[in-house]
Amino acid sequence: MKFLAGFAFLIVSMSASAQDQALDQLSQTQSESSRQIESIIVISNRTMHSLRIQLRQMKDRLFSDFNELNDDDDFDVDCRLSNEARTKIQKTSCFPVFLDNAIYQNTQDSLDLGQFGPPALDFRKSVQTLISENEDNFELLRSKIVEMAETNDEFGRGLLAFGNNQQEFDYRQQECMKKPAVLFLFRKC
């Protein structure tokens, strides 16, 4: 009988120590799991589509910030979706106000029905000609953008980030164009 009582005591004490060990392990596991993960960094290449969208958003934000900081309204830049005549693909085109005014004036001059009769369509200048005629204004616009980037840190950082993303996009597009096309026509870029 003493043997049976001693054996029962041994089993109870062993199970108690096992329970203590299990509780210690459980508390240790809970303390490890309650620690927060500092950060998880996932590095992945952006798709060309997402990069295009990001560039468009960055460009809109940059020109909006420039227009707010700029004092001269002739040097504000307006961005809009353009509709090409022979395609349904829209692209964002940005023009400074002085170039828009020159295009408007050129169109008015070419359609002037005054004393000369029908419109002189051969008198109309191309947009490239108007850009070259306004090269001084474009130089002044470039200098204003550089000056603003130097004086306004946020605008300068945004301009630098846009330039870096544009370089990445151009590089990836060149690399994609080197790869063979699917069905000799389509590329995934």
Image: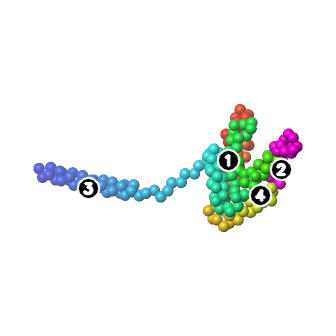
Q: Name the residue under label 4.
A: 138
Q: Is 103 displayed left or right of 169 in the figure?
A: right
Mark 3 or mark 2, which is nearer the start of the sequence?
A: 3
Residue 100 is situated, as x and y percent measured from the top left of the image, at 74, 51
At label 2, counting other C-alpha atoms closer than 10 Å, the crowd grade (few under 14, some 14-19, many 20 or more) is few
Image quarter of the C terminus = top right
Mark 1 or mark 3, which is nearer the start of the sequence?
A: 3
Q: Of circles 4 and 3, which is in front?
A: 4
Residue 35 is situated, as x and y percent measured from the top left of the image, at 41, 58
Q: Which colour scheme is used?
A: rainbow
Question: Could you say which is closer to the camera, residue 184 or residue 79?
Answer: 79
What secondary structure is marked by label 2?
Answer: helix
Quarter of image, res 87 = top right
Q: Marks 3 and 1, how far apart in space?
A: 76 Å
Residue 5 is situated, as x and y percent measured from the top left of the image, at 14, 51
Question: Could you say which is closer to the camera, residue 41 or residue 117?
Answer: 117
Q: Which mark is residue 39?
A: none
Q: Name the residue under label 1.
A: 80
Instruction: Please say if the residues under marks 4 and 3 sit with CB atoms less than 8 Å apart.
Output: no
Q: What amino acid is at disc 4?
A: Phe
Q: Marks 4 and 1, how far apart in space?
A: 19 Å
Question: Could you say which is closer to the camera, residue 103 or residue 5?
Answer: 103
Q: What amino acid is at disc 3?
A: Ser
Magenta residues? 110-133
Q: Marks 4 and 3, how far apart in space?
A: 84 Å
Q: Mark 2 points at which residue?
A: 129
Mark 2 or mark 1, which is nearer the start of the sequence?
A: 1
Q: Residue 17 carries which label?
A: 3
In the image as oriented, which residue stretches furthest toward the right?
Answer: 116
Q: Of circles 2 and 3, which is in front?
A: 2
Residue for point 45% across, 56% down: 37
